[in-house]
Amino acid sequence: MFEFLCDTNTPVEAAVRSRFDGAVVDRDGFRGELTLTVRKDRLIEIMNFLKGDPAMQFDLLSDVTSVDWPERDERFDVVYHLTSTVLKQWVVIKCRVKEGESCPSVVKIWRGADWMEREVFDLMGIPFHGHPDLRRIVTPDDWEGHPLRKEYPLGREEIAFTHNVKTLKPRPVIISPDYKDAY
Amino acid sequence: MPTDIANLHTETMTLNMGPQHPSTHGVLRLVLELDGETVLRVTPHVGYLHTGMEKQAESKNYYKFIPTTDRMDYLAPMSNNLGYCLAVEKLLNVEIPLRAQYIRVLIAELTRISSHLVWLGTHAMDLGAQTVFLYCFREREKFLMLQEFLCGARLTASYVRIGGLMLDLPEGFLDAAKTFSDEMNAHIDEYEALLTRNPIWLRRTQGVGVITREQALDMSATGPTLRGSGVDWDLRKARPYSSYDHFDFDVPLGSKGDVYDRYQIRVEEMRQSVRICQQAIAKMPGGDYRSRDWKYVIPPHEDVAHSMEALIHHFRLVTEGFRPPVGEAYHAIESPKGELGFHLVSDGGANPYRCHVRGPSFVNLQALALMCEGRLVSDLVAAIGSIDIVLGEVDR
């Protein structure tokens, strides 16, 4: 079928596995894209290795994002998309974070992680320790809750028109795991 | 009594620039710490246009999110459509007919020209060259007419669909596109005659907003912002999608990483886009404009009118959508502004479980502070323009 120019049999996986024994907890090669899930406490050494090693040279951090799996014990996935502009290779690194825990920041390795981690912090509520300036970025500073979490409602608010402004009551945002009317 | 000058104290001034400042290209707010006219610190504040598009995606099926992508980078709507559809197609593993791929390349490059025209016009106007703006918008209008001819919409196209395109090219479109691209080179010469060797333009842009190769990579900059610093990185070459490897074009590179380099790169990119458009028009293959994988792709209207089976597929896809296999896919394209990536997570349901957009404007904007700290306020205006941000994409 469709050829995607990315090979799962890159030396990246072998190098990470041999160098960091037991740090890789899961792997995935869906649609030819190598994804390695690594232990949170080894993340920084692995990232340093991936950026600095001459056979890796992941010099461009393309993206940092997060996925929420509320049923799972380690609820969040923090997903890093790494690119090597020198060797033209790609890898996805994932790290699982429990609710209330923080994830190590990679800003010291790639400064570009600054705003991307702030976005994850803002919308998903995962704190990053070691981040120089962890503030909300796209929502207002006094916003409550983290909109991309699954329990956060998409919300329905009555719209103000000239005829109903007097009767309009602001609806409180209900954030609860059993919020069924989320959209 | 004479004032003792040595005892006078000075202090820095904090100034708010934006969110309604015309040179911030939208609703970007910058808090500047100034020493006289020198910028000591820039703190950008974004989010004024945040509409939670990623959250919205989770409540819609895959088809229904396409119109939302138009509204991110509204200067290059068809590039956004393409990036999103390619990510969904990667999730589904659908094969796209060659004709659809070529049309996608053609419209993506036309969109790049249009996006760069708006950038050039507004950037030049920020720096006081008003005529260029009128020239650029003259050609942009022609592109908008072309887009309207193609899909009926001038701004929010939604022309690229999952598995192919909304419609086949209308009759006469290729001729119109050929006229547009053939005339374009002469128009680019006109803009260059106004700017490239203009002493005022050179003074305002050369050596301004410098970002080195290492800094640009470190800040995750992509697109012309990265290539201006001399990094040869273009996803159309590095990881060709939608048959870009069938086309012959060059990737212009800068050396100094200043505003002038980024200007020259975008102007040259327009010329290269013209080349790609001309090749795509000349080599345009026949065949389907949409994949025939009806499990995931809506059958065209002609089929629905004649075939019961097509009608059933159409009904199912429109009412409930399709359910991709469980998995995650990230697909990035070289949009006019840089790497535009869509990260889609499927849990096997009809809606995306998670849809993340990696907007090039958002990430490139981080580099602003590096470009202008220690420089004058007027250089800041030049630097913002040279990054080419669209706030709809920064905030999403």
Image: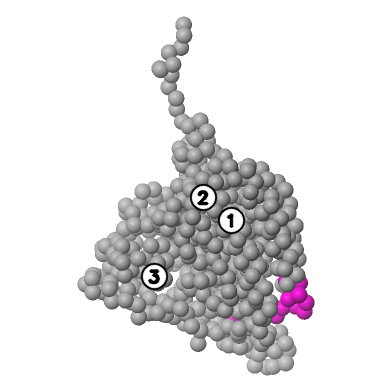
Q: Secondary structure at mark 3?
A: loop
Kindly indicate whether the residue at mark 3 contacts the one at mark 1 (C-beta within 8 angstroms): no
**Residue at the spot x=55%, y=54% of the render?**
B262
Disc 2 is attached to a residue of which chain? B
Mark 3 Cα shell of 10 Å, populated few (<14), some (14-19), many (≥20) = some
Q: Quarter holding the C terminus of chain B? A: bottom right
Disc 1 is attached to a residue of which chain? B
Residue on which disc 2 sits? B258
Question: What residue span does the magenta drawing correspond to?
Answer: B162-177
Q: Secondary structure at mark 1?
A: helix
Left or right? Give the position of B127 relative to A56. Answer: right
Kind of residue indicated by mark 3: Leu
Residue A62 percent location from the top left of the image: 44, 64
Residue A154 in view: no
Q: Is residue B170 in the magenta section? A: yes
Kindly indicate whether the residue at mark 2 contacts the one at mark 3 (C-beta within 8 angstroms): no
Q: Secondary structure at mark 2?
A: loop
Measured in 3D between alpha carbons, the distance from the residue under mark 2 to the one under mark 1, in whole angstroms, is 10 Å
Both on one chain, marks 3 and 2? no
Toward the right, the furthest residue is B172
Kind of residue indicated by mark 2: Asp
Mark 2 Cα shell of 10 Å, populated few (<14), some (14-19), many (≥20) = many
Measured in 3D between alpha carbons, the distance from the residue under mark 3 to the one under mark 2, in whole angstroms, is 26 Å
Residue on which disc 1 sits? B264
Quadrant of the rendered structure where residue B187 is?
A: bottom right
Residue B95 percent location from the top left of the image: 55, 85
Q: Is residue A139 in the magenta section? A: no
Image position of A41 with respect to B375: above or below: below
